[in-house]
Amino acid sequence: MAHHHHKLSLKSLLHHHNHKEEKEHNPLAMSDEHILELIYSTHVHSDTKFEIDPLFTLVHNTLIRSTSIVDDLVQGSKSSMEDIDEKILQPNFNSPYCTLKQISFEMCCKAPGEETAHETAVAILHKLSHYEWDAKAVLTLAALAVEYGDFWLLSQHLQTDVLAKSVAVMKRVPLLIRPANLHKHREAITEVNNLVKATLQVIELIVELEKLSSYDTKDVPALLPAREHIPVDVYWCIITLVTIVTQIECLTTDSEEKQELYHYGQKINVVLSKLRKHIALCRHQIEEAEYYRKLRKLFQTPTEIMEVFKVLIFAKDAPQPLFDCASETTVDITVLKKKHVYLFISTLDITEEEISVLRPVHESIKSEVQYKIVWVPIVEEWSEHLRKKFEVLKAKMQWYVVQHFGSIAGYKYIKEEWHFKKSPMVVLLNPQGKVLHQNAFHLIEAYGMKAFPFTTVEEETIHKEKHWVGSVVGGIHSNIDNWQIKEEKYILFYGGKDKEWIQEFSKSAASLANEAIIKELKISIELFCVEKENRNIFKRFWKRVESLFVTKAHKAADAVKQEVQRLLCYKDETGWALLSKGSSVVLSGHGTTMLKAVAEFERWKEVVVKKGFELSFKEYHERVAHETHRCAQFEIPDVAGKLPEAIKCPDCPRVMDIFITYKCCHNDNTSTTTNANSTYY
């Protein structure tokens, strides 16, 4: 009994092994990864080029007419052949006839079944090993087209032509088209015909995809995943064509055995849907890449500003009118013709302070016909909430506004070529569409109308100026303007995070200003605490310092750049102070060293008589600073444009390290959503 039981177990194991082997060779049970593994060894990379187009044209025309004949036969109707979309034949085409016959030989007279179909498909792939993947698919389809076209062509003429009838009988045509058989196999014939049509569509898309591969994948990234899957898609086309041939043979012999096509039809339709999506995405990316090239060329070639603006904002769409905030009416974009245009580009997170940077410019140029400001709001996806926010912001402006509730066509260009991030920027274009300044926002914020018309030429000129304090503090308080311009007084600007330090410094600085020796020498010192003033003054002060730094970031290091950078290093410290005379900086320093130098005036007051106030203060402060070690660090927002990768320390010859800080203030009313700041140490 035990021996008998062992024999049964062995038998069941063998059955299980055979079942497993069958499953391994059944393509319907295989993953695409497994299929790719099996078929990739059949492919030989070769330089042999096969001209696909002429053959595919013939195949397309053959199958379009053949499938139309079948539809008419099955439905009992007669369609007009004039409506068929045929491709134009190329003259002098030399058919790869022997290759097609070899493929036909592989496909014909095979028993139904998934394993046989798989083996046949692999055999065909071996035969076509030196051809590209799209050519393998087209050649196999051509082999089917010859047989399928011949079969249904004969069905049309066997009643009227003796030769056609003789050949048709040898090919078993009458057996299938006999009314009784036609009725009996109607569904099966329709299934075959529909599968031929679907496979033709898939192969047409594979051919198209291969043509698109001439584009750079940097421009068309969707090509990569689409082309990676082509070998498996070709395999499914070939195995489907094999099963179609087998099913036709089953139908013409009136065999009880049939080839199951349903799952192949499902697979082909999935591949068809996927390829359509891939190609649609590729076409979209190609369109974008061509638009990008066109835009780049426009900015390199003198072109009327209005045309440049039209392509940048609307591309192929009909240009929308601009909204004129001053008159509260819409105006045609022709108002920009032959003008210098300031493109004020920002997201809807722009603040009141940032909008106010452009107001003095607008006030100064509104009577000037040749200068115009246009706000270009950058919104990736509009919503009702964002439309309302747009209307609120628009009401705060006096210039032209783009009212286009779709995405800005040139957004990618603005982001990549002009380095737009999140902070607002002002791009200056001349009447020929040439960029005169890629981002003048910081120049405007730092210098105001002093830098008008804000070209890079003005920026270079103003960069050479050594007196920069007036640009930072000008207009923020009436007293400062009087002290600086009219009276040329010394001003001690100071502030910091520590209120106790501010109180202590205020007391020591006031004491210094009132010292007898200072009065005797007719030295007038005014104090201005930036932190004690209202929040707007504080913000404006540091915004201007940051903007001043951005305008100088790419320039060669000089005394002014170092002074600005040094001041930025003190922004988040416990305390800081800067001594100026008129618009010139005398010195600036960290709260610790400046407080010590001011508080210890008794120690250096005698030197003031000999060397003067400025030199005495500088020398004593330098001595104090030398005894104190502290790291220099500063943060600047991730502004539009590129910041330099290497920045020298303002206090020593070393290059500062860079860290990226991410910050969010959870406030919907300002632009303090997530920001990236570069921190230099």
Image: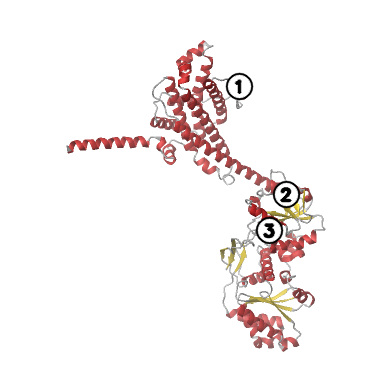
| Mark 3 surroundings: few (<14), some (14-19) or many (≥20) residues within 10 A | many
Looking at the image, can residue 143 be seen? no
Q: Which label is found at residue 80?
A: 1
Q: Position of residue 83 (x, y in %)?
A: 62, 24
**Mark sitting on residue 309:** 2
* CA separation in Å, label 3 and label 1: 62 Å
Structural distance between the alpha carbons of marks 3 and 2: 16 Å
The reply, left or right, for residue 309 in relation to residue 208 is right
Q: Quick check: 165 left or right of 360?
A: left
Q: Secondary structure at mark 2?
A: helix
Q: Amino acid at mark 1?
A: Ser
Q: How far, Cα to Cα, is label 2 from label 1?
A: 50 Å
What's under tag 3, amino acid-wise?
Answer: Met
Q: Quadrant of the N terminus?
A: top left
**First-in-chain label (3 vs 1):** 1
Name the residue: 53% across, 14% down: 157
Q: Residue at x 59, y 45 (%)?
A: 219
